[in-house]
Image (spheres, rainbow, N blue to C red):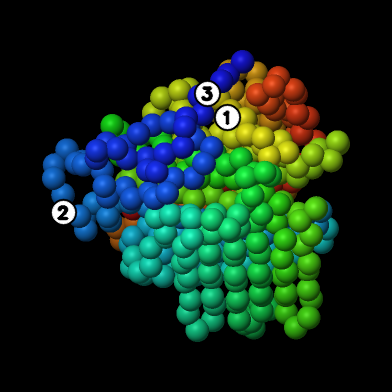
């Protein structure tokens, strides 16, 4: 069975200008990829190296009925704020997307106690990463338009170490151009208000969420596929997974694939995500170790595209159901039956 060493906590994934590779279960004190010495063959000024770093934070929250996805990203030529709320019973969707030119704000280098916000006359998006207080908070406020009602959300992830074991990785695209990622499954509480008075109260006993923080010297042509879902099994245990197939090297030795069961982390092996019938048909997610065998069946398509002279992006993020099985570090087979989640296929040229 596949195993991977969980390394001792460190203050940074960079040592003497060299990026480290590995998997940890505690956040770094700081992640500053500009500390890396000569990430490219030729010496580049600091501002140009900074332009090649892409970063984003994303939130996924759901209970028995609703799924909320929120994304705040900075790819330096432009920034993106995006929110999706989906009612699993009625199929109703609330979608907000804002494209902001320029690099503007930066995402924090630390998750200990830092915040970032993006706002305009019609929306406000704020993230307060506060691991020192065992929480991560998300605040959203979006004004109504003719086609869309107003939307407000205040959410808090319970990041207590008693209940949550994050996965923290540093992976390599090349020797000195890494990908850093922090991801965790946690209980979530909060409130969502839609329109004039429709209020949703999220109880952390039945509501979960995955939080992800990414930074990296991603390739000019970036390709990534992600499969994630979470909920409760037949025994009432909170569980979930977040699996990615990307362009990093040595994925058997180290990757960002994770399974959580009742707060316990299992690093998963590399996988292949295939779509024999295309994006709208079943996705097959499998490994060669016998620990991942899933089928994702899309039910609701979500597509977006951005085209600029020097950049483009194509993002498919269908919602649907996962079925199959996963194996945790103790050898237990975790049955996955009609678990609601998301698939993502991203192509980014920037």
The picture places residue 251, in percent across and down from the top left corner, at 45, 26
So how many labels did they put on this image?
3
Res 125 visible: yes
Visible residue check, residue 342: no
Residue 47 against residue 149 in the figure, above or below: above
Give the mark nearest the N terminus, 2 or 1: 2
Q: Which residue is mark 2?
A: 45
Decide which of tag 3 and tag 1 comes sooner along the chain.
3
State the residue in front, 90 or 29.
29
Q: Which residue is mark 3?
A: 4
The alpha-carbon separation of the residues under discs 3 and 1 comes to: 7 Å
Tell me if mark 3 has few (under 14), some (14-19) or many (20+) residues whose alpha carbon lies within 10 angstroms of its own: some
**Could you tell me residue 290's position as x and y percent?**
65, 18
Vertical placement of residue 281 versus 104, above or below: above
Task: Decide if residue 188 is on the left or right side of residue 41.
Answer: right
Q: Which residue is mark 1?
A: 267
Q: Which residue shows up at 60% across the image and 77% down it?
A: 142
Nearest to the observer: residue 159 or residue 210 = 159
Q: Which image quadrant: the N terminus?
A: top right
Where is residue 170, by image quadrant? top left
């Amino acid at each position: 069975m596949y195993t991977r060493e969980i390394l001792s906590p460190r203050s940074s994934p960079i040592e003497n200008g060299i990026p480290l590779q590995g998997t940890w279960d505690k956040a770094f004190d700081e992640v500053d990829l500009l500390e890396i010495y000569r990430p490219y063959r030729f010496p580049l000024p600091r501002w140009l190296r900074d332009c090649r770093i892409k970063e984003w934070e994303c939130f996924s929250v759901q209970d028995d009925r609703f799924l909320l996805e929120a994304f705040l990203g900075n790819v330096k030529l432009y920034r993106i704020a995006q929110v999706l709320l989906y009612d699993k019973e009625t199929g109703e969707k609330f979608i907000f997307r804002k494209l902001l030119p320029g690099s503007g704000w930066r995402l924090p280098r630390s998750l200990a106690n830092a915040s970032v916000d993006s706002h305009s006359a019609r929306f406000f998006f704020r993230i307060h990463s506060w691991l020192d207080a065992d929480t991560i908070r998300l605040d959203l406020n979006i004004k109504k338009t003719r086609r869309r009602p107003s939307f407000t959300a205040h959410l808090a992830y319970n990041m207590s170490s008693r209940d949550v074991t994050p996965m923290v990785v540093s992976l390599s695209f090349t020797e000195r151009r890494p990908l850093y990622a922090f991801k965790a499954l946690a209980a979530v509480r909060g409130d969502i208000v839609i329109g004039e008075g429709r209020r949703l109260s999220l109880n952390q006993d039945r509501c979960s969420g995955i939080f992800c923080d990414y930074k990296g010297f991603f390739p000019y042509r970036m390709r990534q596929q992600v499969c994630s879902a979470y909920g409760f099994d037949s025994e009432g245990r909170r569980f979930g997974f977040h699996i990615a197939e990307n362009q990093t090297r040595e994925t058997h030795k180290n990757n960002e694939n994770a399974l959580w069961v009742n707060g316990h982390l299992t690093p998963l092996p590399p996988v292949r995500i295939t779509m024999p019938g295309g994006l709208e048909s079943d996705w097959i997610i499998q490994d060669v170790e016998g620990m991942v065998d899933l089928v994702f069946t899309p039910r609701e398509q979500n597509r977006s595209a951005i085209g600029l002279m020097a950049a483009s992006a194509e993002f498919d993020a269908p919602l649907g159901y996962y079925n199959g099985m996963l194996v945790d570090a103790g050898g237990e087979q975790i049955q996955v039956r009609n678990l609601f989640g998301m698939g993502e296929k991203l192509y980014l040229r920037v």
